[in-house]
Amino acid sequence: MEIHRLSALSDNYIFVLCDPVNRQAAVVDPAEAQPVLDCLERLGVELEAIFNTHHHNDHVGGNRELLTRFPEVIIYGGVEDRGRIPGQQVFLKEGDRVAFGDCQGEVLFIPGHTKAHIAYYFPPKGSTECGELFCGDTLFAGGCGRLFEGTPAQMVASLAKLRALPDKTRVWCAHEYTLKNLQFAQTIDPSNSSLSARLRWVEAMRRQAQPTIPSLLEEEKRTNPFLRWDSTALQAAVQSRDPIETFAFLRKMKDRY
Ligand code: ZN
Ligand code: FE
């Protein structure tokens, strides 16, 4: 599966997925239609599917126009998002399968940012390949989404589900928030040398206006404080022994950062 990362709006990413054999394409979270249309034209492929992770406008804003241009396209989203995603035709729940061309993905139900949020995970096809995770606004590089419709306990369960995927999973999140996320992380986890090294790399990338997405799940596990609610260093930093309380406290600190 080829993945094309497109910039949209101020800091969103849209991902165009292309089956290289059948030349069929899907798009994850089209914030707007034009960059997707340009990409499809460049590739000379038809759009078969729109995979939405959740209903926020910066993830579904291009649905209508894409549907107009490709009347056969199928629009997927979470079952709890019924009525909130423009043009939604398929209502997905945990464990459902999705496909376009020869590529097959699995659905993970990961509420917290919104009550309906889902992720799409495409397992590796061979032992040397990475799996591909499209996780919208739930897991970010170095951070996680705000809790608009969910509780800390829900978000911890959702992030735990993502953390359980293989280390060699590429994380394709929907926003370029990495620098600010890691700057925050550094304030609460200053002795984490993997984190400092990652922050230096991200600073260098952003100075050259380069994207920091995708990241590798293995690196998120080492450096992302929102996957480390059970680390003794972070629990000590917030003076808690409870994973959910630790997470909730970190999330509150980040909201104010
Ligand atoms: Zn969102
Ligand atoms: Fe968003």
Image (spheres, rainbow, N blue to C red):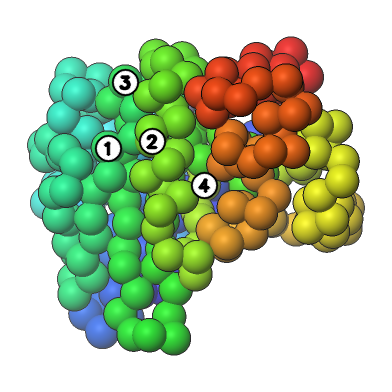
Give the distance between the C-alpha atoms of the residues marked 3 and 4, in whole angstroms.
Answer: 18 Å
Circles 2 and 4: CB atoms closer than 8 Å: no
**Split into 4 quadrants, where in the image is the C terminus?**
top right
Residue 49 place in picture, x, y as percent? 22, 53
Which of the marked residues, 2 or 3, is nearer the chain's N terminus?
3
Which of the marked residues, 3 or 4, is nearer the chain's N terminus?
3
Amino acid type, callout 2 = Ser
Amino acid type, callout 4 = Cys
Q: Count neighbours of disc 2 (C-alpha within 10 A) and say few if under 14, some if 14 to 19, many if 20 or more.
A: many
- Secondary element type, mark 1: strand
- Secondary element type, mark 2: helix
Q: Which residue is mark 3?
A: 115
- Secondary element type, mark 3: loop
Which of these two is toward me, 42 or 12? 12
Is the C-beta of the residue carrying label 3 under 8 Å from the nearest atom of ligand 1?
Answer: no
Which of the marked residues, 1 or 4, is nearer the chain's N terminus?
1
Q: Which residue is mark 2?
A: 158
Amino acid type, callout 1 = Phe
Q: Which residue is mark 1?
A: 109
Q: Which residue is mark 4?
A: 173
